[in-house]
Amino acid sequence: MIYPMAAMVLLTFYVALRMFKARVSAIKSGQVPIEHFRTYATPTDQLPAMMVYTQRCYNNLLEMPILFYAACLTAMVTQLTGTLMLVLAWLYVACRIAQATLHLRGKVRWRMRSFFASVVCLLAMWGVLVGAALAR
C-alpha cells in the first residue's frame, strides 16, 4: 500500500511544482502583480487560466486523497493489504493521475468522469475495510 500512497505524494508534488511555475510565469509576464499573493483578492476571471487550473488541481489533491491515505494506512494496520485492496489503490491513483492531467489541460467532461471513477474506487476500498471489520 505504500507504493500507491507514494505515487499520490509524487503527483501532489508534481502539481505543486506546476503551480509554482505558473505563478512565477504570471508574475514575470506582468499578468499578475506579486501583491496578489498577499491577499489572493484578485477575482479568478482576472487570473491566467493555467494559474487557476494548477491551484485548483493542487487543492483537489489535498481534499479527497486524505480519505485514500487513511484507507491505505488502515489497510496496513489491519493487515488487509491483499490483491483487491492493492488493485483498488492503484486504480484510484490511475484515476487521480488522469483527473489531474485533464484538470491541468482544462478538460472538464473527462475530468469529471475520472474523478467519479476515483470516488468509486475509494468507496470500494472503504467498503472492503468496513466489511472486514464487520466480519470479525
Image (cartoon, rainbow, N blue to C red):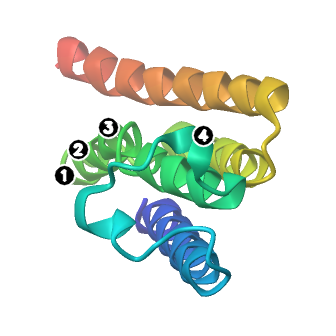
Residue under the image location 66 percent in, 51 percent down: 100
Q: Secondary structure at mark 2?
A: helix
Q: Is residue 106 above or below residue 12?
A: above
Q: Is residue 16 above or below residue 121?
A: below
Q: Secondary structure at mark 3?
A: helix
Amino acid type at image mark 1: Val
First in sequence: mark 4 vs mark 2: 4
Q: Is residue 112 above or below residue 76?
A: above
Residue 14, picture quadrant: bottom right
Left or right of 107 in this view: 103: left
Q: To which residue does mark 1 refer?
A: 77
Residue 76 showing in the rendered view? yes
Neighbour class for label 3 at 10 Å: few (<14), some, many (≥20)? some
Q: Nearer the viewer, mark 2 or mark 3?
A: 3
**Label annotation for residue 74:** 2
Amino acid type at image mark 4: Asp
First in sequence: mark 1 vs mark 3: 3
Residue under the image location 41 percent in, 67 percent down: 2
Q: Nearer the viewer, mark 4 or mark 2?
A: 4
Residue under the image location 69 percent in, 59 percent down: 50
Give how far across and how far down residue 26 sits, in percent: 61, 74
First in sequence: mark 3 vs mark 4: 4
Q: Quadrant of the C terminus?
A: top left
Q: To which residue does mark 3 refer?
A: 67
Comparing 75 with 34, the one in front is 34
Label 3–label 4 contact, CB within 8 A:
no
Comparing 92 with 63, the one in front is 63
Amino acid type at image mark 2: Thr
Amino acid type at image mark 3: Leu
Q: Secondary structure at mark 4?
A: helix
Residue 87 showing in the rendered view? no
First in sequence: mark 2 vs mark 3: 3
